[in-house]
Image (cartoon, rainbow, N blue to C red):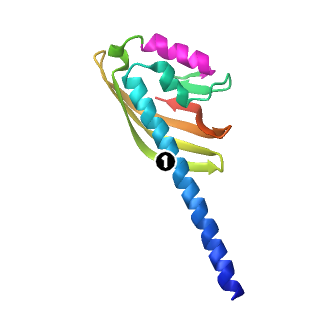
Amino acid sequence: MKSGKTLLLIFLFAFGSITAQNSDIETIQNILDEQEKAWSDHNLEKFMQGYWKSDELTYYSGGKITKGWQTTLGNYKKGYPTKAHTGKLNFKVDQITKITEDSYYVMGQYFLTREAGDANGTFMIIFKKIDGKWKIIADSSC
C-alpha cells in the first residue's frame, strides 16, 4: 500500500511539472505572437515589451553586441524607420527548451515581407522569468 501512495505522489509531481512547463511554453509562444503583431503594426515600443527593460539586456547581431533595452529600441528605430521597413513579421519557432526552472531558450526563424525588400534569418533568444513575468534577456539574430 505504501508503494502505491509513493507512485501516486511521483505521478502527481511529474504531471504538475509537465503542466507547468506546458504553461510556460504557451506563455512564451504568446509573447512571440504579440511581438509578430506589434512589429507588423510598426509598433516597436510594443514589440520591445517582450524584452527585459534593463541595461543588462544583450542583443547580438551582425558581429556586434548591443547592451541595454533603450539602446536596442533605438537601433530598431534607426534600422526600421517606417512601416515599409518593418513590413510583416512571421516567426517559425523550431524549439523551445527549458534550461532551468526560470529560463528557456527559443530557436527559430524569422521572415520579413516588406516593401523595402524581404529579409529572413535565424534567431536564438533566452527567456527568463523576472518578477513573475517571462522576458527576453538575450537575443542573437542573424
**Is residue 79 rendered magenta in the image?**
yes
Q: Quadrant of residue 34?
A: top left
Q: Is residue 97 left or right of residue 81?
A: right
Looking at the rendering, the stretch of residues picked out in magenta corresponds to: 66-80
Number of disc labels: 1
Q: Which residue is mark 1?
A: 26
Camera-nearest residue between 73 and 12: 12
Instruction: Mark 1: give few (<14), some (14-19) or many (20+) Cα within 10 Å.
Output: few
Q: Amino acid at mark 1?
A: Glu
| Residue shown at the point (45%, 30%) measured from the top left | 35
Task: Name the quarter where the N terminus is drawn.
Answer: bottom right
Q: Main secondary structure of the magenta part?
A: helix
Helix, strand or loop under label 1? helix
Residue extending farthest right: 2
**Is residue 22 rendered magenta in the image?**
no
Q: Position of residue 119 (x, y in %)?
A: 35, 25
Q: Is residue 26 left or right of residue 10?
A: left
Q: Is residue 90 left or right of residue 62?
A: left
| Residue shown at the point (46%, 40%) measured from the top left | 30
Check the image and report above or below for 75 versus 26: above
